[in-house]
Image: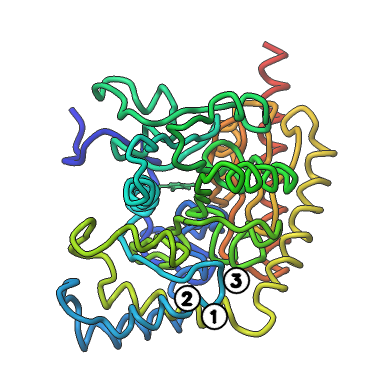
Amino acid sequence: MSATALFGNYARSKLAFDHGEGVWLVTKDGRRFLDCGSGIAVNSLGHSHPHLVSALQEQAGKLWHVSNLHQTPEGERLAKRLSETTFADKVLFVNSGAEAMEAAIKCARRYHYDNGAPERFHIVTFEGAFHGRTLGTIAAGGQEKYLEGFGPKAPGFDQVPTGDLEALKAVIGPQTAALAIEPIQGEGGIREIPTEYLRALRKLCDENGILLIFDEIQTGVGRTGKLFAHQWSGVEPDIMAVAKGIGGGFPMGACLATEETAKALSPGTHGTTFGGNPLAMAVGNAVLDVVLGDGFLEDVQKKGLNLKQKLAGLVDSHPKVLEQVRGNGLMLGIKCVVPAAEYVAAAYDAGLLAVPAGDNVVRVMPPLTMTDDEIAIAVERLEQAAIAVEEKLVEGAAE
Ligand SMILES: *Cc1c(COP(=O)(O)O)cnc(C)c1O
């Protein structure tokens, strides 16, 4: 029946893109779509960014892969830059978000093991979380729909409702190694964790010798207008998982940690064949060249405010379709009244790509390079989509 030779684990759209230019994606038959999904918060600098293209091309002509048996100067440089701009002293490069979270979890467990407390291996996570799709990270995320049918859930993960400090205190015990949280839940539906709550987590961790892990795989690398979202709060983790935007579309991830924590992953304890590969490192450095450039992050903040205000106006004028705007910087979500998937489909028809999330939210996460003119086009198209959904509602009511 189906013509595809691919596994059926994705319900893909019918769109097949041929190339990209900045915030635009172009299909084989020449239709242009405004990309407000960024390949799920990955294309931080849009498509075919000249600086990224030349960095990749130059590295491709020089050296692709040597493995972690040898030095990688590009990786040394990227790690140094990440440590200079964050809480971290050390960086471990991997190939994806789930691998970055796996490394974070292993680092936390091994830290306590090394400190003579092997029984401390439980990680506390929060309802609505998403940490990846490996056996470890589906256990961390705790969502039944991702765990079902894949055998016993990996042990050592406890989940509590987000925002409920008493429930958290009740679950913490001599078995607790770490708390892991996304500063803004992405897949969960752009749910911001209040600064107060992050502060309370830090305090609880300090009082109990527990490590704090931030999953900034989606929120990181300028998405919210700071290099990392937690920098808005001033609360620093011990370990942080990064991926998505750091590669601007090239697959890579990183686990960042303090010196004290990172030393748990001593020689032989952990590894990855491809992690820190020179191609990925060259692109990662090129992404930082732009994101750390003068005024870039301030610009993301301004554009984020502009877009959020316009989306709030849209919600006000279309209350039958849209309910609320939330998020920070260019990590925004529109909570829908109609099914989110329906609004996303209408947006496709209007020539705009957005991404559905949990809690009936549509994520609007354009490349950080989007201009104010392009923001105006995005809002126009999102309005067109809202009108189309409204018209359908009227037709439905008339039948
Ligand atoms: C996407 C995502 C992951 C998983 O990343 P993959 O690269 O798909 O493995 C983990 N955590 C968060 C918060 C994410 O958004």
| CB under 8 Å between discs 1 and 3 | yes
Quarter of the rendering occupied by the N terminus: top left
Q: Name the residue type under label 3.
A: Thr
- For the residue carrying disc 1, how many other residues have a C-alpha within 10 Å: few (<14), some (14-19), or many (20+)? some
Task: Say whether disc 2 or disc 3 marks the residue closer to the N-terminus.
Answer: 2
| Mark 1, residue position | 290
Residue, x 71% and y 69% (percent of image)?
Answer: 373
Quadrant of the snapshot with the C terminus: top right
Pick out the residue farthest to the top. 399
Residue 293 in percent (x, y) is at 60, 83
The label shown at residue 287 is: 2
Q: Look at label 1 and name its amino acid.
A: Val
Q: Residues within 10 Å of mark 3 (few under 14, many from 20)?
A: many
Q: In which image quadrant can residue 55 be found?
A: bottom left
175 or 100, which lies in front?
A: 175
Answer whether labels 1 and 2 touch (C-beta < 8 Å): yes
Helix, strand or loop for disc 2: helix
Could you tell me how far apart the alpha carbons at marks 1 and 3 are, in whole angstroms?
Answer: 10 Å
| 144 in relation to 272, above or below | above
Answer with left or right where residue 4 lies relative to residue 14.
Answer: left
Q: Position of residue 152 (x, y in %)?
A: 27, 22
Q: Nearer the viewer, residue 76 or 372?
A: 76
Question: Can you identify the residue that label 3 sits on?
Answer: 369
Q: Residues within 10 Å of mark 2 (few under 14, many from 20)?
A: many
How does the figure colour the protein chain or chains? rainbow
